[in-house]
Image (cartoon, rainbow, N blue to C red):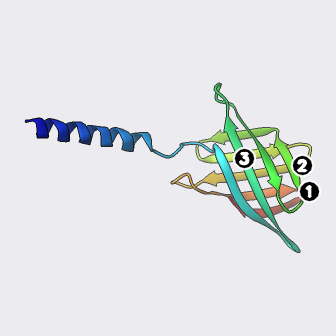
Amino acid sequence: MKNTLLILLLLSGLSWQASAQTPASGPEGTWNGTLDAGSAKLRLVVTVTKSAAGVFAGSFESLDQGATIPLDTVTLKGDALTFESKSAGIVYEAVLNKDRTELVGTFKQGGQEIPLTL
């Protein structure tokens, strides 16, 4: 009887732990990618946070150019995600994959549109 109770407690603890480890459902975190801008390949890092009020914010960093640009807006509608920096004229429109591990989209700046996966 004690062994059965111990096994039940162990199994219920394991199932609780597994349910607590589900992946995030949104874009929060750090996203990395390489922008193929013709003559240059630029390593990019986008960081997205979410406030307690549910508002997204973030920054866009070009490692090779040494520039960090704050994002004015980060918008999530379903699986569609948009980052925008008005001062740099950057818009990135992407879709989160089903596992929420990759963003596939288009980087737009200065009239150019370049495919970018983060």
Badge 1 or badge 3: first in the primary sequence: 3
Q: Is residue 99 above or below residue 75?
A: below
Residue picked out by circle 1: 110
**Residue contact at pointers 1 and 2, CB within 8 angstroms:** yes
Residue 96: give x, y in percent of width and height.
60, 52
Three-letter amino acid code at the position of disc 1: Gly
Q: Are marks 1 and 3 in contact (CB under 8 Å)?
A: no
Q: CA distance from mark 2 to mark 3?
A: 18 Å
x, y percentage for residue 40? 87, 71
- Amino acid type, callout 3: Thr
Q: Which disc, if any, is residue 89?
A: 2
Number of numbered discs present?
3
**Which mark lies nearer to you, 1 or 3?**
3
Residue 1 is situated, as x and y percent measured from the top left of the image, at 7, 36
Q: CA distance from mark 1 to mark 3?
A: 22 Å
**Seen from this angle, which residue lies furthest bottom?**
39
The residue that appears at 89% across and 74% down in the rendered structure is 39
| Mark 1 element type | loop
Q: Residues within 10 Å of mark 3 (few under 14, many from 20)?
A: some
In the picture of the structure, the residue carrying the numbered disc 3 is 47
- Of mark 1 and mark 2, the one earlier in the sequence is 2
**Distance Cα–Cα, label 1 vs label 2:** 7 Å
Q: Quadrant of residue 48?
A: top right
Say above or below: 5 vs 41. Answer: above
Q: Quadrant of residue 25?
A: top right
Quick one: which residue is furthest to the front in this view? 2
Q: Secondary structure at mark 2?
A: loop
Which residue appears farthest toward the top when viewing the image? 53
Q: Amino acid at mark 2?
A: Gly
